[in-house]
Every structure is written in structure tokens, then in C-alpha cells.
Image: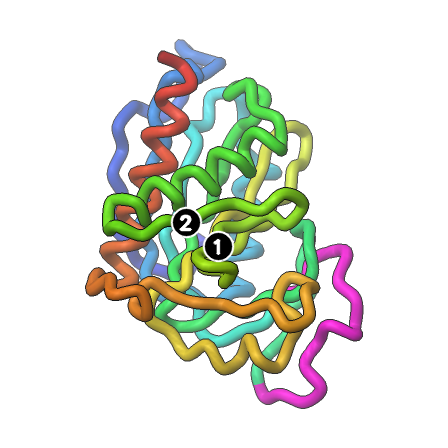
Amino acid sequence: MKEFPVSGEEITSSPRGSSQSPILDPKSPPIIRRLGVVPYRSAYEEMRRFTSTRTPATPDELWIVQHPAVYTVGIAGRPEHFPKSTSIALERIDRGGQITYHGPGQVLVYTLLDMTRQGLKVRELVHLLEQAAIDMLDLHGIRAERRSGAPGVYVDGAKIAALGLRVRAGRCYHGIALNVDMDLAPFLAIDPCGYPGLRVTQTSALGIAADPVEMGEALAQAIARLLGERHG
């Protein structure tokens, strides 16, 4: 990612594709990249570039990132859910869903997956991402759940993780955002994910001391584990 203006650590569990292996084994674990704090637009453009140029030999990747304060609006976004007045930038993007907020103290795991190679449907991937967050929170003694018709993960009715995806030619990008230790006030200016009055919470408010770096690592590892379990 030479044009991607971030520095980060990469762990590779399997070699990248070559002319000797034109189609990667779906059992190959994803590469995990730890990218730190990245401007939203930079990450978004790089996800799109990665997805448009990948081949059947390109390994899947999980990107752990945080963003400076930004609202993002999906392709179905409606103005009535937007903030009435704000100094926070608003980005219109190509994932599904309505408006949400990203900011310091929230960690995202972007899932750059070849869904055709993985044999995954969109609903299956949504379920997998939700389950990864549920499993991770359960390790901390927190009972979380999903809601029918409202993708994401909830604790006592408050949303703690949001997700949105885009699939192009059988390959997906975007992913899941987990609230860890952040200023939740910007959520009050919007209808989060298009739901007026939806409460939000975060892991720090639930007594979890782990910071965003630790929680992002745990979430990425949980996603990688569930992907691996699908192939035995």
C-alpha cells in the first residue's frame, strides 16, 4: 500500500498469491494490518482501490483503524437523520445504511474479503461480524445481542457496534465499528443508523478497561477465527 499515507504493523499468516498459485486457498487466514489513526477519506479511497485491483490470488485482509471525528452517510442516507448544525465533517460513501459517527476512541475493523472465494453471502457475513463482537464481549462478562432487521450489536438496548458493507464483483469492504472509550456526544446530533432516539454505549462504560488498540486486536482475531472455522 505504497500510496496509503499511514504506517502500521502487518502480520502475514500465508504468502501472497503468485503465478504458481493463481487462486488462493479459502482456508488461508487473512492478513491483519494495524494502521493506527487514519483520516477517513484516505482509508475509504484505499479500500476501494484495493478491492478494484485485487485478483483471485490476493489474500483477504482485516484493517484495524481509528478515525478523527467524522460523520459517514451510506447510499440510503436521508437528510432528516443528519445533524442540524455541526463542525464535524460529513462524508457520503458507498456502504449500505444511514448516518453514523466515527471518532477517536472507537475502533474499526475493515473486512476486505473475497466473498466468492469464502463462499459467503452478505447476510452470513453480517451474522459473522456480529457474532465476533458478541463473542469478544462475552469474554469480558458482557452479554450482547443482535436485533432482527437492525444490523449491529446491542447491550441492554444500546448499540455498541455498528456495521456496514459494500460488495462489488463478489468482494467486500467497509466493516464493523466498536465503541470503546470515546466522546459519545456527536451521536446525540443524529439519528444513529437512521433510528431516532437510539441509545449508544461503549465498552469503557461497561467496566472494560481495555483500550481501543487492545479491543481492535481482539475483534480482528475473533473475525479471523470465525472465518477459519467456516472451513473446518
Tally the marks.
2
The location of residue 126, given as percent across then percent down, is: 55, 38
Classify residue 93 as left or right of residue 42.
right
The amino acid sitting under disc 2 is Ala
Q: Could you say whether the residue bearing mark 1 is in a helix, strand or loop?
A: strand
Magenta stretch containing residue 195, yes or no? no
Which callout, 2 or 1, points at the residue further toward the start of the chain? 2
Give the magenta-colored segment's residue range: 72-87
Q: Main secondary structure of the magenta part?
A: loop
Classify residue 196 as left or right of residue 179.
right
The location of residue 143, given as percent across then percent down, is: 36, 49
Quadrant in the picture for the C terminus: top left
Give the number of the disc on residue 165: none
Q: Which residue is mark 1?
A: 154
Marks 2/1 in contact by CB < 8 Å: the verdict is yes
The location of residue 140, given as percent across then percent down, is: 24, 51
Q: Which residue is mark 2?
A: 144
